[in-house]
Amino acid sequence: MSEVDFLVKLRDAACMVHDACEERLQTFGPPGVKDEKAGKNADIDMLKIPWVAATGSKGAYESADDQSNLEFQKLSTILGEHKGKMRIGPYFVWQFTNATKIGRKKSQ
């Protein structure tokens, strides 16, 4: 395994630990510990975004690129505020590099 492969796997593992901690804090943490921006995320109705099944190098995911959709626009704005990736409910959500497409994958 090359050093780059190792660093990619280490980064992905760290993201998974971070996501798991955030989920536990959202569920069981005291109000002062919870994410202050969680209220914004509740405003997004992920069911109103037309998701399309896709497969990438890390497996199956769903993507959306309907820029005329209001929920897509809200999600895109919030992702921009979170450096292009975040957790919303059971999903890890990210913005593709070109910022015109959003992906989501259910966390395990």
Image (cartoon, grey):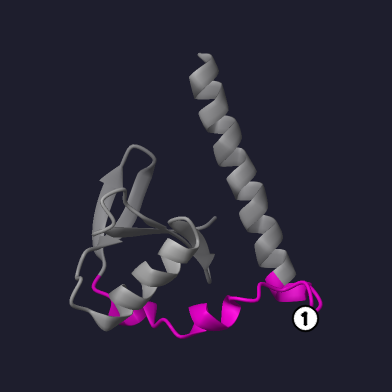
19 w.r.t. 1: above or below: below
Can you name the residue that lies furthest to the front here?
Answer: 81
At x 67% / y 48%, what residue is drawn? Answer: 17
The segment highlighted magenta reads 26-50
68 w.r.t. 4: above or below: below
Can you name the residue that lies furthest to the top here?
Answer: 2
Task: Determine which quarter of the picture holds residue 93.
Answer: bottom left
Say what secondary structure mark 1 lies in: loop
Q: Is residue 28 magenta?
A: yes
Task: Determine which quarter of the picture holds residue 103.
Answer: bottom left
The number of discs equals 1
At x 46% / y 85%, what residue is drawn? Answer: 43
Q: Is residue 83 left or right of residue 49?
A: right
**Identity of the amino acid at label 1?**
Pro
Q: Which residue is mark 1?
A: 31
Query: From where the camera sits, is residue 15 visible?
Result: yes
Seen from the viewer's position, the closer of residues 4 and 76 is 76
Task: Estimate the x, y position of residue 101 in percent, counting from the top left.
Answer: 26, 58
Task: Estimate the x, y position of residue 75 in percent, counting from the top left.
Answer: 38, 72
Q: Is residue 4 left or right of residue 63?
A: right
Query: From where the camera sits, is residue 106 visible?
Result: no
Task: Estimate the x, y position of residue 61 in percent, counting from the top left.
Answer: 34, 54
Image quarter where the C terminus lies is bottom right
